Image (spheres, helix red, strand yellow):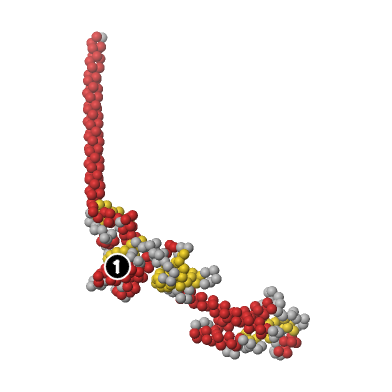
Amino acid sequence: MKNVDVKELIAVMDELEKERGISKDYLVSALEEALVKAYKQNFDVEDGVDNVKVTIDKITGEMHIYSSREVVAELPVPELEISLEEAQKIDKNYNIGDIVNVEIVPKDFGRIAAQTAKQVVVQKIREIEKDMVFTEFNDKKGEIVSGLIQKADNKIVVMDLGKLEGVMPLKEQIPTETYRVNDKIRGYVLDVEKGLKGTPQVIVSRSHPDFVRKLFEFEIPEIYEGLIEIKSVSRDPGSRSKVAVYSRDENIDPVGSCVGQKGVRIQNIINELNGEKIDVIEWSEEPSIYIAAALLPAQVMAVDVKEDEKFAQVIVPDDQLSLAIGKSGQNARLAARLTNWKIDIKSESQIREILLSQMQDEENENLEKEEKEEEIEKKKKKTKKEEKEEVVEEVEKKPAKRGRKKKTENEE
């Protein structure tokens, strides 16, 4: 069969393979399958007949259509079988039961083939490009991307990321920020999904704690190089974040390196977050030290930990209590998230009152115990006295009986 426009498509496929990495073999295979369907639809092939095959030469673009038919002795079923006589005209070696590929030359199929080929190639290119973009951005999960805001209404922000759109739902936005069309912003790739039509869609976040983590990696070379490690991040988006850092190198000050000279490094991150406060603390494997640091900027007097329960009782000076707890409990809440410990904060006065109360309770308990013991002793003494009196009484009664008996004998 004439190769019609298929030859031109083969040239296009060669270019696509070189420039975009789209497999030519995949496109040719998809085109062959589509042409089989087109043949069946346009030439009234019965449903269930599955013996048509299309082959395309990957170099010349030459196309052939074959019908696979079984060799029978006589009265062949059209489109499914071929007589032995006809089969042996093709090749004398064919016998009954063999399968023969008979080439079909349908009228006007060249026009149908050309139209189908264009549609299939365009469709497959789109699908492949979508898959490639999906794979590209799926590999960027957990990374930071930047783009222009295309749309900012109905509680959803849509970003232009170049090859596709990024969507930032309301819960992934920073509450204190205002988003305007054409503003350039950065966001954290939270997930990559496929829409209803297979179009990839990137879910972007600016409120996720890992957005802060990634910003630190961008701004602090020591973190990017692995000299400083971010152990934990807790965040109240738009208001405050706490970041615990650690370095195995004793010569490196992890907190100082993150803050930078005159706070330059940390200020860049704060600017990106539109003024969100950031507390950088040094991580410690000793829970009491770590928890005390996590409550900064408040000063801590003592930390009593119960490791089995992961519970910590923290004592702070009276004037530091409100600072340790924070507005609406924010500082204590962030510290608990950062350390993954339950933290109970008490002032020095509160602890003193608790201790005095406990001492008073103990004294009361001791007094009650002493009173009970005295009552028990009294009961014991009383019981002994009663027992003694009973014995005396019994003894006194016995001689009187003996005396009356002797008197009776004398009287007799």
Indicate whether 105 appears above or below 236.
below
The quarter in which the N terminus is drawn is bottom right
Q: To which quarter of the image does residue 101 belong? A: bottom right
Bin the neighbour count of mark 1 within 10 Å (Cα to Cα): few under 14, some 14-19, many 20 and up. Answer: many
- Side of 81 where 279 appears, left or right: left
Residue 249 image point, x, y percent: 25, 72
Amino acid at dot 1: Val
**Residue at the limit of the structure toward the front, as seen here:** 181
**Residue lying at 66% horizontally and 85% vertically, measured from the top left:** 110
Q: Where does the image place residue 378, in percent across and percent down from the top left?
A: 23, 31
Instruction: Tell me: residue 375, above or below residue 114.
Output: above
Q: Is residue 97 above or below residue 356?
A: below
Q: Is residue 229 visible?
A: no
Q: Position of residue 332 (x, y in %)?
A: 31, 57
Q: Position of residue 58 (x, y in %)?
A: 58, 87
Label 1, on which residue? 245
Res 105 quadrant in image? bottom right
What residue is at 32 percent from the left and 73 percent from the top?
219
**Residue 139 visible somewhere in the drawing:** yes
Residue at point 55%, 86% (across, down) = 12
- For the view shown, which residue lies furthest in the right direction? 75
Residue found 29% across the figure and 67% down from its top: 245
Q: Quick one: 182 or 294, which is closer to the camera? A: 182
| Residue found at the very far top of the displayed protein | 411
Disc 1, SS: strand
Q: Nearer the viewer, residue 39 or 98?
A: 39
Q: What is the quadrant of the C terminus in the image?
A: top left
Q: How many marks?
A: 1
Q: Is residue 212 left or right of residue 402?
A: right
